[in-house]
Image (cartoon, rainbow, N blue to C red):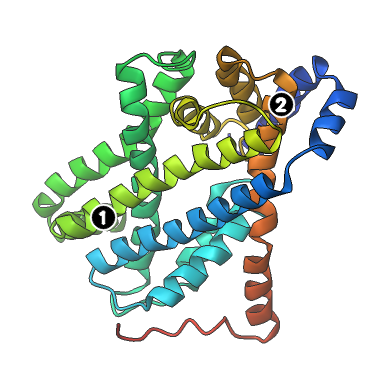
Amino acid sequence: MRPFLLPFKFAVSGLLIAVVFRNIDLDSLAERFAGQSRGWLIAAASVTIAQMLLAGLRWDQIIRGLRASVPLETVIRVTYIGTFFNSWLLGSAGGDVARAVLAPEGGIGRIKIIYSVLFDRVLTLAGLGLVILPVMALNIGPLARSMPVFASLAVAALPFVGLTAIAVIAPLIGGRASAVILRIRELGLSWRLLCQAPGRLGAALAIAAVSQVAIPAIAFSLAHAQHLDVSFFDFVVLIPPVVLIAALPISIGGWGVRENAMIIALAPIGVAAGSALLIAVQLALLASVLSLPGGAIWMRGYLGRSPPPLASAPR
């Protein structure tokens, strides 16, 4: 099945992008792009950078909750490198692997650092779910109770629920189980350890929710860069479902899915398809371009035959 997954994702992205551009006036789109406000573009870039910083702070809370000793500066640096891999490897798996490999062990071992990356991914999805739930409960916006959003929310909630279930049964697993079962037990016990630090877990979840609100702020800035008269509240309501749908693992980096969802979501507030498409594309490109220094940091360490200065040290 795996050999066919990547071609399938490319096919989905290609088909959806073709659907989008079929009804877009490219000359008008070029004019919108050229006439953008630089000030609002700078604002969008600034919020994007802040969101990357929030990602590092979120992961730091998880690492602390697992009682690892890794400097905050190191966590943020590795997160930045991971953002580069996320953007340029067309998916989040590359960034997660980079973080799991490059982060120092911090006195808890490599496997628990890997678990911390997994927990960070789970809490990121949970934070998005927290932002989405009020929108769904109040049925606000065209995507609020659509099947893609229900499916995406289920995907977001399932890892959190699954880890909690594993944590409950982990102490019941004996020491003579198979290696795989023992790894699952260790995963559950690590999640229990994090849950025993509710301040860290709560902080990570709160940061995850705030970082998801940052995405509407970026989209809002990009809309005003096009001189669109839209409110920030509209974007807080309409953009999270778009992000949730784009996170479904059915396309390459969300391309095609994100653009179609953005056009559907913003149509009720009077945003033309071309403007919505430009917002969606620039939203993705901003993260890609601004993550390039992370790639430079990684290459500097790689070419020097040693990683960047990521040595573990007490806080």
Residue indicated by mark 2: 275
Residue 236 in view of the camera: yes
Q: Is residue 260 rendered to the left or right of residue 33?
A: left
Residue 252 in view of the camera: no
Q: Which mark is residue 137?
A: none
The quarter of the rendered structure image containing the N terminus is top right
The CA span between labels 1 and 2 is 36 Å
The answer to which quarter of the image holds residue 175 is bottom left
> Residue 206's spot in the image, x, y percent?
29, 48
Q: Amino acid at mark 2?
A: Ser
Q: Nearer the viewer, residue 67 or 223?
A: 223
Q: Nearer the viewer, mark 1 or mark 2?
A: 2
The quarter of the rendered structure image containing the C terminus is bottom left
Residue indicated by mark 1: 203
Q: Residue at x 81, y 19 (%)?
A: 24
Residue 265 versus residue 76 in the image, above or below: above
Q: Nearer the viewer, residue 1 or 265?
A: 265
Residue 213 versus residue 51 in the image, above or below: above
Local secondary structure at mark 1: helix
Most extreme residue toward the left, as rendered? 172
